[in-house]
Image (cartoon, coloured by chain):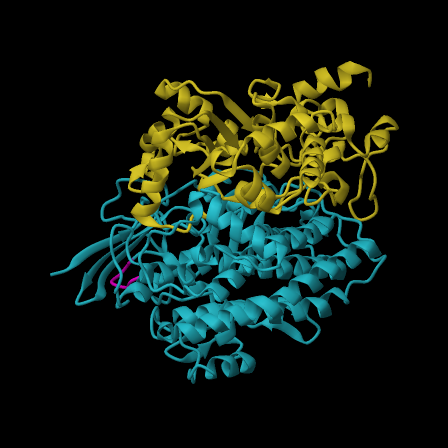
Amino acid sequence: MSNLLSVDPVSRIEGHMSVSTAVEGGRVSKVRISGNMYRGLERLLLNRHPVDSARIAQRVCGVCHEVHGISSITALEQIYRVVPPHNGQVLRDMILGLHIVTDHLLHFYNLCSPDYIDYSAAAGYSGRDAEMKNISDWISSSGTKFVINKTPGDYIKDKGTARRFALHYFQALKIRAEAASGLALIGGKVPFIHALLPGGITTEITPDTLMRYYRVLTETTDFVNNAFIPDVMELAERYPEYFKIGGAYDTFYAHDSLKYKKGYLFTSGVIIDGEKRKFDYKMVKELLNSSYYNPDGSPNESAKGAYSWIKSPRYNGYPLETGPIARAALSNDAGFRQLIARYGQTSIRSSVMTRLLARAYESRRICNYLFERSEDFVIGKPTIAHVDLQKKLTGEGIGFSLAARGALIHHIKAYDGRVTDYKMIVPSTWNFGPTAAGKHGVAEKAVLGTPVRFGGDSGSIEVGRVIRSFDPCTACSVH
Amino acid sequence: MLSRRDFIKRCRDISVAVIGAEVFATDIAEGFMRIAASKRPQIVFVQGQSCTGCSISMTYGNESDFIDFVTRLVRVQVHPNLSFSQGHGYIQMLEEVTSAGGHILVLEGSIPQRMKKACLLGEEPLYDALKKHLQKAYAVVACGTCAVSGGIPASGRNETGAIDIDQYMRQCGISKPLIKIPGCPAHPDRLMGTVAYILGSGKMPPMKDGVPQQYFGNLIHNNCGRFQYFSQDIYLKDFEIDKHSCLLKKGCRGTITKSDCPTRRWNGGVSVCVESNAPCVGCTHNGWPFKENIYYESRNIEDLPWTDFKKNVLGMGKK
């Protein structure tokens, strides 16, 4: 007998997603993951001026708010045949890197940590730390419902840990706001920097801009080192079983990204069957078997056999996992291997806990990188090469880039100043695509076999943990 | 917790942030004083066809601080990105709050009317589900341009039939006080400040067509830091060299877009789009993201195709 359980909707992620599972003998035996929101960004860009995509495609997602802009601009610059000046490239890396780290903080503390921590245990504090007291009082007396978790599970209930996490929950929000001000100084405002145009960054960068950036980067780095990494490690110690839960295909994929003198912080490639290969874009196909589209790509909510708005990208037929774990695997990062070796992991294999650790570990790497990268900026040199924003562009461009959640592609075709084809292949599309051609999507595969000890109306917390370990972004995945 | 003196000071800060003057500080303070923690207004967030950018913008804050907002001013009852619960437990909580009523419902994103599966709330299409959550609301806040006027999802051919909350409520025969906070994304002060205003003063802010006038009363152009370059006909030609000129001939929509961006600024007041030498794209305008090119360049400002510009800016003196 199988028991049907669903998490509908999956909260604490970006967007609209549901997971339905059948549980047999205490494990998930069947799974379907549905992306439940569609806007049609690729299609509404058709016939617009290609440069408009810089502003509209940027708004695919308000969580990973700078990554789509940068990928789209990279594609546009190929059509313009313009290369941004050195400073422009440095600024973009500074934006991308800091943004990605703060995105990781949001994911871990605000989206993911309530899967493990029972925050009600933080109530009743009577010590001398004023900040802690405020938070603790608020949790006990506010009557605010969003902190109530009715999903049964094996949460951490000791007061000390719950209080420390509660403090960090709010500190993460503060650090993010601080870091956002650093990004806004470069780009005008966030979310959605408008200073990003084909050719570079429009802003006049002065030494005080860089000093402010340096200050927020230092604060962010301190928080990553003193809170984020130890907190994730604590979860890894307390939930060692999650190194065996949530494994997918162990196929990984990443792009060359975040440049520095010696090359790139992250290296490009694909790992299939334990073997690293060069990434070849021609091998990528998006299947529509289980998605709400007609063969021509137009939306069709009653398409036969469909259950998701997300498409199913395949690389030479393989579903690929992307994200910090894939970046670590492709770079075959020695530091990361050492870190997981503490928990008995001899190689980088996909699991819930390895994903969480990869995110924290990479945050530290990116912070260190950004200190080095920001020193590459040469005050007084141009940040942008001028281009004609009205030009009747014809051509094709592909922006290979990255988001917090993995490898990102924007592919633009233009004719006579109009977009004729726009394709985005987004990290969460890879990770959350539905079953197609007999193969489950990556996250579906990861949910299969998940042991379910706790179930009920709200679905299983274990399934929730597997899903959230990918840091899903549904708005991105469907676009 | 806060001392009374700290509290009044904080209310003064909020008053300055919301209204731009300290005069309402005591009003607001008294408003807050009356509200015990358990009686603070309940806020429910619902996301339609959206990107979550407005919620993220709110967490960044500016003059107003998100953590203060959540822990001292209101009770955030349900938020898709924050709620600790999931699945049915989450939907149940939403239903408990909205069926008891008296809540402020904040909608982020548009609502697909034609292709209903293009946005679900739990197992139901948002189009069908939203009604019951609105029925007993005290007020509705349309947060961001998608909720206010359809925004990006409603642009182009609008294949999903995305509509804004105003159209939706008319179709469903629901009449509720509606406050519109346009912006792509919505500015944190304009959202949190409006809620704080209602809370503190016990009444709706002065509005025109549902848009609070203290935030959207004037053209960006009129308060623009580069207004004097416009007055002297100094326009940006080359982004590489010109760093302070008027951006109008690069398609800046500050002359047709109403908002207090130039004075309020963003992300802790550190900057604003035009200050980064990027043209305003008009994200608070109800036409956003527009039919014509976003960067509409023009050799002569008289040739810009915007009728409102001709009427309100050229008509007011500049020939």
- The percent coordinates of residue A333 (x first, y second) are 54, 79
Residue B257 at least partly seen: no
Q: Which quarter of the picture shows residue A251?
A: bottom left
Above or below, B121 against B227 in this view is below
Residue B245 position in % (x across, y down): 83, 37
At x 64%, y 60%, the residue is A98
> Which chain is cyan in the picture?
A
Magenta residues, start to end: A435-440
Residue A312 in the image, given as x and y percentages of width and height? 35, 56
Q: Residue furthest front?
A: A126
Judging depth in this view, the residue of B299 and B186 nearest the camera is B186
Compared with residue A325, is residue A169 higher up or lower down, i.e. above or below?
Answer: above
Q: Quadrant of the C terminus of chain B?
A: top right
Please identify the residue farthest to the right as the structure is shown: B232
Q: Is residue B158 left or right of residue B298?
A: left
Q: Is residue B244 left or right of residue B146?
A: right
The residue furthest left is A1
